[in-house]
Every structure is written in structure tokens, then in C-alpha cells.
Amino acid sequence: MANFSLEIGGALSTAWEYAKKYGLLIAVVYLLVGILTNGLQSIGGPSFQDSQAIGEAIGRGDWESVGSIAQAYSGSIGSNIGTMFGGILSTIVSVGLYNQALGLMSGRFNEVTFDAFKLPFATYLKVFVVSFIVGIISIVAFFCCVIPALFVVPRLILAPVYQVEHPEAGIFESIGAAWNMTSDNTFSMLGLGIVIFGIIILGFCCCCIGVYFAQAIELFALIAAYNQLKGNLQ
């Protein structure tokens, strides 16, 4: 297998060049998605805190409290539904933007276009499942100890990108590909993540839109890293 190494400076330089050309439009997409997601997650109202409170309220004949708790519980259900749809929306946008960035860097696209979202439903579904599995693995690694998580997460973060570029691949094939392509590049991927986190913080300090432009830089940096490392699969 080939041995390509991640050059953090090169990935960030590439990300900045593409962000200067296309970052503002992508930042607007992130902004709109953020507004919609927050709106969906706010659906419902207060959450149901203590199921035992219903029994206590019934026991003392306080039917007004029973009604209030029941209303809070139904609000919690609405909030969970809103969160679920918000997560689905975020996945859809992530898939489209991964495809957009891949297309821009390969020359398949020469502008930001909604054509990047014209992908088979199966691709969106696979990426959702890949992201879910990667998230579970990351959580398990984190609870085992923070140190294992620092080794696992950088090795798997490119799995959704691989799935987008290879829609015919199986779910675990994509996860395995991400693991293999980042071999011997764990610390480089971790370093890139730390730098990107710093860019996000700077974006936050530059007011609201700065955060979304920083996300555009993050998008292009991730795809640039993927392009540098995917040769390890050959």
C-alpha cells in the first residue's frame, strides 16, 4: 500500500484558497441550516423531568399539576422530534457540501450549485448510518478514556467523505477505508483538528457570520486532507 502523509500546512493552504472563492456562499448555507436546525430543535417546549411527580400529584389530588406535567411531557416529545428532523437536515446538508467540495477540488463543479445535492437516496442513507456508527465508536472510545478517543476519532472522521465519493461502497467498507487511509497519520489528523478548532474559535470571536465562514474553511480542509490521504488505499 502507498504511504502518503498528511501535510497540515498544505491542507490549510488549499482550504483557504477555496474558501476565498466559495466560502461566503457556503457560509450562507451553514447559516440557513443553523437557523432551521435551531428552529426545529426548539419545537415542543419544556422537557419532562420526573415521572414520579405525576404519581405524587395524583396522590394528593392536584390535578392542575398533573395537567402541567403531562403538557411538559408532550412538549418533550415534540422537542425530540424536532431534534431528530434537525439531525436529518444536518446530514443532508453535510452530504451535499461534501460532494460540493469534492467536485470543486476535482474540477467536476466550477461553482457552488444545488446539483451537488442531486445524489441517490441510498447515498444519504449510507452516510447517515456511517456517521451514526462513527459517532457511537467515538463515544465508546471516549468513555474508555479520553486518550483512546484521541486515537480513534481522527482515524474515522473521513469515513462519511469516502462514502460520498464512493456511493457504491458498503457502510463498513467506508469505515474501514477511512481507518486504512489515515494509518500513520493519526497525530497529523489530530493536529489538523486542533488547528481547525482554533479557526472556529476565531470565527466565533469575529461575530456570527465568522463562525459559518470558519465552517467553510473546515469543510475544505477536511476534503483537502482526504485528497492527500486517499492514495493510501491504492
Image: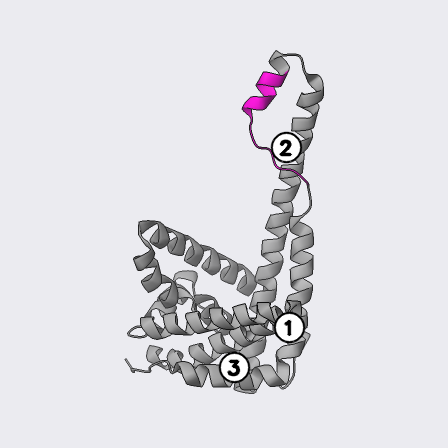
Q: Residue at x 70, y 24 (%)?
A: 67
The picture places residue 228, in percent across and down from the top left corner, at: 40, 82
Kindly indicate the quadrant of the structure image that contains residue 69: top right
Residue 119 visible to the viewer = no
Q: Where the C terminus falls, by quadrant?
A: bottom left
What amino acid type should be assigned to the residue bearing mark 1? Ala
Label 2: element kind:
helix
Residue type at mark 3 is: Ala
Residue 49 visible within the image:
yes
Q: Which residue is mark 3?
A: 15
Secondary structure under the numbered disc 1 in the rendered image: helix
Q: Position of residue 157 (x, y in %)?
A: 42, 66
Q: Secondary structure at mark 3?
A: helix
Neighbor class of circle 2 (other Cα within 10 Å; few <14, some 14-19, many 20+) is many
Q: Earlier in the sequence, mark 2 or mark 3?
A: 3
| Amino acid, disc 2 | Tyr
Q: Residue at x 68, y 22 (%)?
A: 65
Q: Decide: is 14 above or below 95.
A: below
Magenta range is 45-57
Q: Earlier in the sequence, mark 2 or mark 1?
A: 1
Residue 78 picture location, percent across and down? 66, 41
Disc marking residue 73: 2
From the viewer's side, name the closer residue of 193 and 112.
193
* Relative to 58, residue 176 above or below: below
Q: Find disc 1 in the rendering and name its residue.
A: 27
